[in-house]
Each structure stands twice: as C-alpha cells, then as structure tokens.
Amino acid sequence: MNDLSRRASGLRTLAPSCGPVRLIGVDGHAGSGKSTLASRLSAALDDAPVLRLDDLATHEELFAWVDRLRDQVIGPLSHGESARYAPYDWTARQFGPPRTLEPAPVVLIEGVGAGRRALRPHLAQLWWMELGPAASWERGRRRDGPALSAFWDGWTTAEEEHFAVDPSRPYADALVLQLPVGYEWLEGPRATAGANRAVTHRDPPAATY
C-alpha cells in the first residue's frame, strides 16, 4: 500500500495519548474507505486492535455514542486497562455480547466522527479520508444495495448535520487519498496550520470530490 508500512511504523513512535495507548482516528464520510484502510493498517501493525464506531452507534443514536465511548473504552484504556464494549447488532437492533479491546501500543478508531470534538483530546493522530460526500455516499449505497436505500437517506441527512456542527477534517493531521493501488498522504489542515495556530475549516479542492 505504497508507504503504509512506513506510516504504521511511524505511529509507534508517537507519544501515548490515552494512558499507554496511541489512539489513531480514521474519519471521513460514510463510504470513503475508512474501514478498509483501518483493516490494512491493523495488519501492518501486527493486528493492532480496531474499534469500529458502527459498533457503538444505533439506529436511534447515529452520533449520540460519546458516553458509551467514554465509559466503555476511553476510561479503561486511559488507565491501561482492557476496555469492554457491547457492539450493536444492526440486524437484530440490539447490543450483542461484550467484546474486549486491549490497551495495545496502537489502537485504531475508525468511523464517521472519529475526529469529533469529544474524542480529539485522546487521539495521538487523526487521519481524514479525502473523498467528498457525494462520491463517498454513492460508493456506500452501491456497496449496501437498494434494500438499505431508506437507511442511507436518513444517514446522509444525519451526517451532514453532524459535520456542520462538529467537523473533523479541519483537525486532521493527514489527508488520505485512496489510489487505484495504495494511498497517498497529504498534510492535513492541523499540520499545515501548526499546533499553536487557529484552524479554520476549508473545503478540499473540487478535484478530490
């Protein structure tokens, strides 16, 4: 994946951000490729744990999962303890048996909102998948098929509302462009602005959408 192995090695050198853990957020629009990148990055990190935010959300609470994340995951990891969370079953519409998330040196959090305001203080780094909403949602709808069309209609509205009040991209350390083979990394708005300068939200160039 181009320099994915080098990028993975670099994550191990970051300062811990949540107890002994380096939490890495992978954010972007639904359908932008977050899950695939997180899986490949996990493999490059010798199977680093991955928390998928779809496991914390529900049909009724698409973005109101902050308390669950804080209580079940962030709290234990910050004390060097194993986290235990109950993943949501989107078919049965209920939470399933608890899973354990170990306080590994690097833990990946992927999903829409992984770089939200409440989570950023606990992240060692934030990556944003640089694919615009229209292209991302089209990919997601094509992947899930017509049976989930109604869900996607509601999701896109909820996602727009979320990012309107709590954007992630302005705080990304890196923008990740998925190529036909591998990825390209660009400096994110946060890295460009510098740690001690204000960051303002600017849309990416039209060519990335």
Image (cartoon, rainbow, N blue to C red):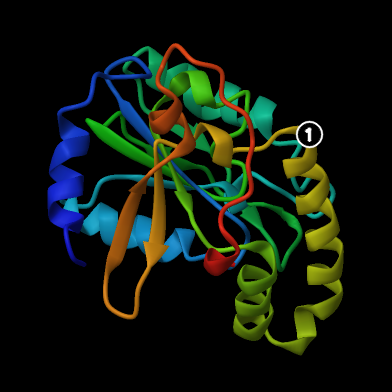
Q: Quadrant of the N terminus?
A: bottom left
In the displayed structure, would residue 7 be above or below residue 40?
A: above
As rendered, which of 56 and 209 lies closer to the eye?
209
Q: How many marks?
A: 1
* Residue 52 coordinates in the image, percent (x, y): 50, 50
For disc 1, the marked residue is 165
Most foreground residue, 48 or 174: 174
- Amino acid on which the number 1 mark rests in the picture: Val
Secondary structure of the residue carrying tag 1 is helix
Residue 121 location (% of width, % of height): 49, 18
Please give the name of the residue rendered at 71% of the width and 33% of the height, measured from the top-left corner. 166
User: With 147 as the anchor, is 85 left or right in this view?
Assistant: left
Position of residue 141 measured from the top left corner of the image (x, y, whole percent)? 69, 79
Taking the spot 22% from the left edge, 52% from the top edge, the residue there is 47
> Where 80 falls versus 131 (above or below)?
above
Quadrant of the frame with the C terminus: bottom right
Please state the horizontal and vertical placement of residue 10, each as a whole percent of the image: 16, 38
Q: Is residue 88 left or right of residue 78?
A: right
Is 71 positioned to the left or the right of 152 in the image?
left
Q: Residue at horizontal 33%, vertical 37%?
A: 107
Compared with 158, 133 (above or below) is below
**Vertical placement of residue 148 versus 93, above or below:** below
Q: Along the horizontal axis of the image, is 159 left or right of 208?
A: right
At label 1, counting other C-alpha atoms closer than 10 Å, the crowd grade (few under 14, some 14-19, many 20 or more) is few
Which residue occupies 67% across, 78% down? Answer: 138
